[in-house]
Amino acid sequence: MSGRTLLMWDDAVTAYDFGPSHPMDPVRLSLTMGLVRAYGLDKAVDVVAAPPAGDSTLRLVHREDYVAAVRAASADPGAADQAYGLGTVDDPAFAGMHEASALIAGQSVGAAEAVWRGDAAHAVNFAGGLHHAMPGGAAGFCVYNDAALAIARLLELGAERVAYVDVDVHHGDGVQTAFWDDPRVLTISLHEHPRLLFPGTGWPEETDADGTAVNVALPAGTGDEGWLRAFHSVVPELLAEFRPQVLVTQHGADTHFEDPLAHLAVSLDAQRAVQEACHALAHEHVAGGKWVALGGGGYAVVDVVPRSWTHLVGVAGHAPVPPASVIPSSWRDEVFARTRQLGPGRMTDGRVVRWRDWESGYDPADRLDQAILATRRAVYPLRGLLA
C-alpha cells in the first residue's frame, strides 16, 4: 500500500459551467487549485488526471436513456429534454455538458480505483461530490453522480463494504437512492432539515431494512458546536460497527455561515475539523486508510470554497495548512484579477472549535439533540447498537 495522496485535477473540469448567472460558478474550482498551488500543496500530493468516465462506467449508476439524453443536450442545448431534468433553471443545458460531466465523474472513479489498488492511501477530487444526480435525471446542479459512480466502481472491483459520509448542507439523496437496500454500502448524510431546504428528503426515519441509509437532519442555524456534536455522535460509532474497506466522503462547503443558499452557521474552522476527523477515521477503521474525499456544494465561491477545499487537500496530503497562516498575496491578486473581489486574508474564520460528546449526556428539550436522538433511534437498533 502506497502512503501517497493523489489530487485529481484536469483544467478542463472548469468547463462544467451552467452560465454566468448560475450559483455553481466554476471559478470556485480554478481558485481552489490556485490556492493549492500558492501553498505548495501540489508538491505534497501527486496531481494526476484520469480519463472521462465512459458509457459502461456511467451505466453503473445511470440509465442508458439518460446518458443518451445528456449527450443530445450537450450537442444541442436548445433541444434539452426537461423530462430528464436537463435545460431547467437548476440544470441549464450547455454545449459540452456531457464531456465536462463525464470528466468530473472520471476523476472520482479514477480516485477510487487508485485507492482500491493501493496506488495511493488517499485521493481528493474537489471538483466532484455531485451527489444529487439520479439514475435517470439531473438534479440540484448535478448531471452525473460521480460519488455514486466511484462507489459503484469499488463494488465492481470487489469491495464488500464501502462507507459514504456526506457533510454537504443538502441531503445526499442521489447516492442514497443509488444504494438503497444495498447492504454493502453505508450512506451517512448530515444536512439541514428537509422541511427547510432542497431536496426535501433525508428525514431521520428515512432508512432501509438494514439501517445502511443514515440521515441526520439539522435545525436551521446550527453552528460549529452543534454540527460537530452531531457528526461525532453518529459517524464514528457507525463506521466502527460497519468496518468499511474504503471510506468515501463528500465535503460540500455550503454549510458555511456565508453561503447564500442555505441556513447553517458553520465556520471554516469546523469544516477543517471534520476533514481532520474523516482522515483520522479512515486510518482508524479502514485497512490502509483508504480514503476518497470529494468536494460538493459551496456558493461563497471566493471567501469560503477555495479555503475549505485547500484545507481538505492539505489534510489528505499530510501537509495541513495552519489556520492562522496569511494567504499568499499572489493568490489574492489572482482573485481580484478574475472576480474584482478582495480575497480573504487568512485560512481561518478565527473560531475556536469545540463540542460535547454524546456520552456527556443530552438535553431532551434541545432541537439539535432531538435530531441526533431521532437518527440514533431510527438506525442504531437495525445495526445492533444501543441508541
Image: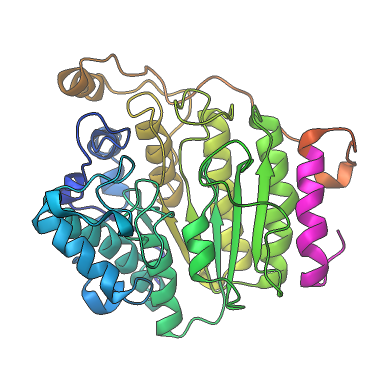
Query: Residue 205 appears in which quarter of the rendering?
Result: bottom right
Q: Is residue 178 magenta?
A: no
Up-down relation of residue 189 to residue 244 (above or below) = above
Q: Tell me if 168 is positioned left or right of 314 in this view.
A: right
Q: Is residue 121 visible?
A: no
Q: Position of residue 340 (x, y in %)?
A: 20, 15
Image x and y of residue 113, in percent = 35, 73
Determine the main secondary structure of the stretch shown in magenta: helix
Residue 41 position by quadrant: top left
The picture places residue 240, in percent across and down from the top left corner, at 70, 66
The N terminus, quarter of image? bottom left
Does residue 385 appear left or right of residue 305 in this picture?
A: right
Could you say which is closer to the camera, residue 176 or residue 345?
Answer: 176
Residue in the image at 22% along x and 64% along y? 69
From this view, report whether residue 331 is shown above or below residue 108.
above
Quadrant where the image shows the C terminus: bottom right
* Residue shown at the point (57%, 43%) measured from the top left: 274
- The stretch in magenta equals 369-387
- Residue located at (41% from left, 20% from top): 346
Q: Is residue 169 left or right of residue 299?
A: right
| In the foreground, 47 or 216 | 216
Does residue 376 show up magenta in the picture?
yes
Instruction: Look at the picture and state if 24 lies above or below 341.
Output: below
Of residues 164 and 96, the one nearer the viewer is 96
Q: How many marks?
A: 0
Q: Estimate the x, y position of residue 284 in percent, counting from the top left.
A: 63, 63
- The single residue placed furthest to the bottom in the displayed view is 158
